[in-house]
Amino acid sequence: MVIIKSKHFILRPFRKGDEKSLIEGINSKEIFRNTLRIPYPYTLKDAKEWLKKTSKDRKKKKPTAFNLAIDINDEVIGGIGFNEIEEHRAEIGYWLAEKHWGEGIMTQAVKVMTNFGFEKLKLRRIYACVFSFNKASMRVLEQNGYKLEGILRKEIRKGKKLLDDYLYAKVK
Ligand SMILES: CC(C)(COP(=O)(O)OP(=O)(O)OC[C@H]1O[C@@H](n2cnc3c(N)ncnc32)[C@H](O)[C@@H]1OP(=O)(O)O)[C@@H](O)C(=O)NCCC(=O)NCCS
């Protein structure tokens, strides 16, 4: 089992019993607005499905996704992971409970996860897609050496809107 320890939190697999803190942390309009696949409102059914999915992913021989909980005192306060894992590349994605925003947690989490991706998963390219208005996420990536490669105009449909996607990547 993968457990990555950092000074203020640990990264560990999601597990049964996480439902309550997961819902408390992730059920946020702001998180919904800034991400593509996280529903709002976030229900118990969503939480259960997520725990099942991540558990299934872990059992796969060649997983296409690898997601960990950000844990402080046994509570899920965020999530970070690789999706679309294909050979040498993967997309990194993350969210953090609003009450912890601005404490430097995600800058640190992206740092340890990026190192893990390059060193243990042997990735050579990690990329992230950020909506044009998500300056905090851009900052997190830039502080970790990710470079802006381009702006994909009107790439994403979210509700009625077409959003520009900022493509960031770090290579090894
Ligand atoms: C993006 C997110 C993960 C950031 O997490 P965090 O732990 O608060 O980030 P950090 O504290 O490590 O760093 C945030 C940086 O952005 C800066 N920042 C925050 N809001 C900002 C804004 N509106 N404009 C510019 N910079 C901003 C902070 O000052 C900080 O930079 P600094 O270290 O130079 O001071 C969190 O806001 C979140 O979960 N957002 C919703 C989900 C999301 O956007 N996921 C990513 C999708 S690509």
Image (cartoon, rainbow, N blue to C red):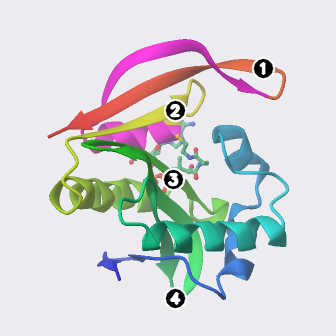
Measuring 72% from the left and 46% from the top, which residue is drawn there?
32
How far apart, in angstroms, are the residues tagged by discs 4 and 3? 19 Å
**Residue that carries the numbered disc 4 in the rendered image:** 73
> Quarter-wise, where is residue 160 in the image?
top right
Cα gap from disc 1 to disc 3, whole angstroms = 22 Å
**What whole-number distance in Å separates the C-alpha atoms at marks 2 and 1?**
15 Å
Q: Amino acid at mark 2?
A: Val
Specify start and end residues of the magenta stretch as a single range.
Answer: 136-158
Q: Position of residue 36 (x, y in %)?
A: 65, 40
Question: Residue 149 lies in magenta, yes or no?
Answer: yes
71 in relation to 103, above or below: below
Q: Which of 56/153 is in front?
A: 56
Q: Nearer the viewer, mark 4 or mark 3?
A: 3
Classify mark 3 as within 8 Å of ligand 1 or not, answering yes or no. yes
Which disc number belongs to residue 94?
3
Return the residue nearer the eye: 168 or 52: 52
Which residue appears at 36% of the width and 36% of the height?
Answer: 127
Residue 130: assigned label: 2
Label 4 close to label 1 by CB (< 8 Å)? no
Answer yes or no: do the residues labelled 2 and 1 have beta carbons within 8 Å? no
- Residue pictured at 64% horizontal, 82% vertical: 18
Query: How many neighbours does mark 4 have within 10 angstroms: few (below 14), some (14-19), or many (20 or more)?
Result: few
Q: Earlier in the sequence, mark 4 or mark 2?
A: 4
Q: How far is disc 4 from disc 2 in space, using C-alphas?
A: 29 Å
Numbered label tally: 4
